[in-house]
Amino acid sequence: MTLMKREHGKWKQVTQPLCFLIILFGIFGSIGYKMGMVNMLSTLMNTAYALLLDTVFYIMAVAVVAGALSALLSEFGVVTLINKLLSPLMKPLYGLPGAASLGIMTTYLSDNPAILALAHDRGFRKYFKKYQLPALTNIGTAFGMGVIVTTSMLGIRSPVGESFLAAALIGNIGAVIGSIVSTRLMLLRTSKLFGKTEPCDELEGGQEEKESKEEKKSLGMRVIDALMNGGKSGVSLGLDVIPGVLIICSLVLMLTNGASADGSYTGAAYEGVAFLPWVGDKLSFLLKPLFGFSSAEGIAVPITALGSAGAAIGLVPRLVAAGSAGACDVAVFTAMCMCWSGYLSTHVAMMDNLKCGKLTGHAILSHTIGGLCAGVAANWLYRLFLLL
């Protein structure tokens, strides 16, 4: 028996690296064959650099502002008030304390990682149990870039004069439904791992006395201290998400985007092989009945939203102008772009930042299901709206 285990261990030492190399060279060899090896490597580096400048620093700026605001709200008891007022609504819908609604508002007005600034604020975390904290990734992502997605859809001009106001609003309702599904699925998993009674943080020794002393500070000092300490946590957050965003998002964008405008590969940032849209087109026989797309091209929008909501909503005006998408499609686009909002690019970094990296796979699976439910709900809700 011992000899068999040794032989199995030796065989694993050989097969594991070989399998890894075959998969690695298979993936990048295929991409390099289409783009050219030099162009592929150049695009990978340029995309990572562009993401660092355009995305990471933006996330850091959002995190600093959100961190300062959350610390200020926590310092003066606003989080406590929101928790009391909205717990009767948030608990039955999401299984989370009322304070989670603050995260919804923050991410809706900015982007997915903004909720992390709240998650690192002690005045916010104290309302959560340990099993509830990882679900903040799901609920925050479901509302990320909400205001940008919604206003972008409202600003699209239809060639037939069709109004997209109702479609955008129904899309938001669809995103809410998707967020509930995603968060609840995540909580089912985390409650089994951590139980439902363990607190998120243990109160540090002397914490109560420390808080009592801080209350004796002048109003101005309390405001300044809260803003500075909250802002510092945002800087740390911005640094923490760099590896996840640059590595994961670069790969996802290369699999999502296509060649340059003239159809050639130049090694510029954001070029790719359009693999994910190709997969979506092959699954159109299944996806079209569920989401009611007017044309097969519409599938590219939610597929692109897996990696970047901004890139996804950029596709919609062209589809509408060409007559390939109507109001029902816009409702579905709004729901899925808002609910998914590039979660394949941010989930890894967000879960790692919450020290829940081992749950990343389940978080992604839960959110995938949630986004699909959001699209289906928006489709049928808009059809029901047309009947009324």
Image: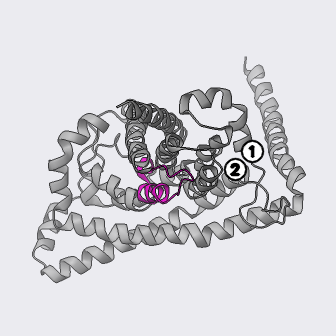
Looking at the picture, how far across and down is residue 54, in whole percent?
A: 59, 70
* Secondary structure state at the residue bearing disc 2: helix
Q: Would residue 237 be seen by someone viewing this image from the given angle?
A: yes
Q: Is residue 347 above or below residue 385?
A: below
Quickly name the residue at label 2: 256
316 with respect to 76 (left or right): right
Quickly name the residue at label 1: 275
Q: How many angstroms separate mark 2 from mark 1 (CA)? A: 6 Å
Contact between labelled residues 1 and 2, with CB atoms less than 8 Å apart: yes
Looking at the picture, how far across and down is residue 164, in whole percent?
A: 45, 50
Looking at the picture, how far across and down is residue 386, in whole percent?
A: 41, 34
Q: Residue at x 77, y 20 (%)?
A: 4
Looking at the picture, how far across and down is residue 15, in whole percent?
A: 82, 34
Q: Would residue 112 be seen by someone viewing this image from the given angle?
A: no
Asked if residue 2 is among those painted magenta in the image, a careful observer would answer no
Location of the C terminus by quadrant is: top left
